[in-house]
Amino acid sequence: MTAPDYGRAFGRMRRAAGQPWRDYTRHAFVEGMKDGSLPRNAFLHYLRQDYVFLIHFSRAWALAVVKSETHAEMLAAVATVNALVAEEMQLHIGVCEASGISRDELFATPERPENLAYTRFVLEAGYSGDLADLLAALAPCVMGYGEIGARLVVEATSESYRGWIDTYAGSEYQSACKAVGELMDQALTRRIGADFESSPRWERLCRTFCTATELEVNFWQMGLTP
Ligand SMILES: Cc1ncc(C[n+]2csc(CCO)c2C)c(N)n1
């Protein structure tokens, strides 16, 4: 199947990320959710780390509000902050509670180095750069899960991880990916120009995107080693 279309800047960065992008979206952890062979304890370990991840990822999206230059940018960024804090984090709390991991236990999860490296890299891209740099670091996470969900909903041969797959394959999440893709195209055009791929900044933006992609690969790998 062909991957969903999340805009021009994302499409170009994704292609430039080549093998790391495939390593991320077709990682053994992902394939284990597809065929149901992923052990439940690995999934729960991943979810607990992901809860910590979402705390810092929400901070990074809040930084996108800080780095916005238009009301449209602020609206897109604030919608994502709300979706993360009010919905996605709640979802993790619910799944963990249903599996016997209390809210307090979840809150007290010690952060693994692979987790810390990823979110602090994203925050640093935003602190030291503008919204274009920050979005290049945020995009692999948002769109990668959209692409994985869209593929797994078609290819899954097991019901074990159906809930997770349906969340990211669903039209609500797919629309969010498209909105972030549009935000990227508009933010890059505003700051760099319509021909942003030919600017001297382009290579660095692609490098940021690729590094974030490699950190996603490490995050899946961490998930396999509880
Ligand atoms: C390691 C890791 N990478 C990506 C996501 C997916 N994700 C992160 S934030 C968000 C909402 C929109 O920005 C989504 C779908 C995750 N949960 N954990």
Image: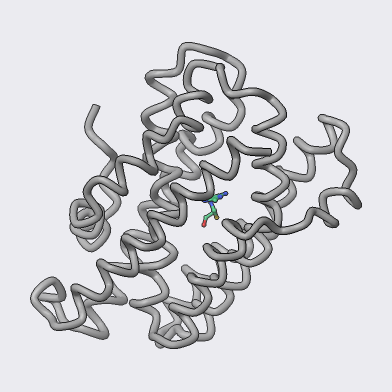
Indicate the position of residue 103 as horizontal and vertical percent values.
88, 48
User: Please, is residue 123 above or below residue 118 in the view?
Assistant: below
In the image, is 79 to the left or to the right of 145? right
Residue at 25%, 45% in the rendered image: 19
Residue at 39%, 54% in the rendered image: 214
Residue at 33%, 59% in the rendered image: 181
User: Please, is residue 59 above or below residue 218 in the view?
Assistant: below
Indicate the position of residue 141 as horizontal and vertical percent values.
45, 54
Residue at 10%, 75% in the rendered image: 195
Name the residue at the top extreme: 157
Q: Which quadrant would the C terminus be assigned to in this image?
A: top right
Q: Which quadrant would the N terminus be assigned to in this image?
A: top left
Indicate the position of residue 60 as horizontal and vertical percent values.
55, 72
Could you say which is closer to the camera, residue 69 or residue 95? 95
Q: What colour scheme governs how the chains and residues are painted in the rendered image of this protein?
A: one colour
In the image, is 33 to the left or to the right of 207? right
User: Please, is residue 30 above or below residue 73 in the view?
Assistant: above
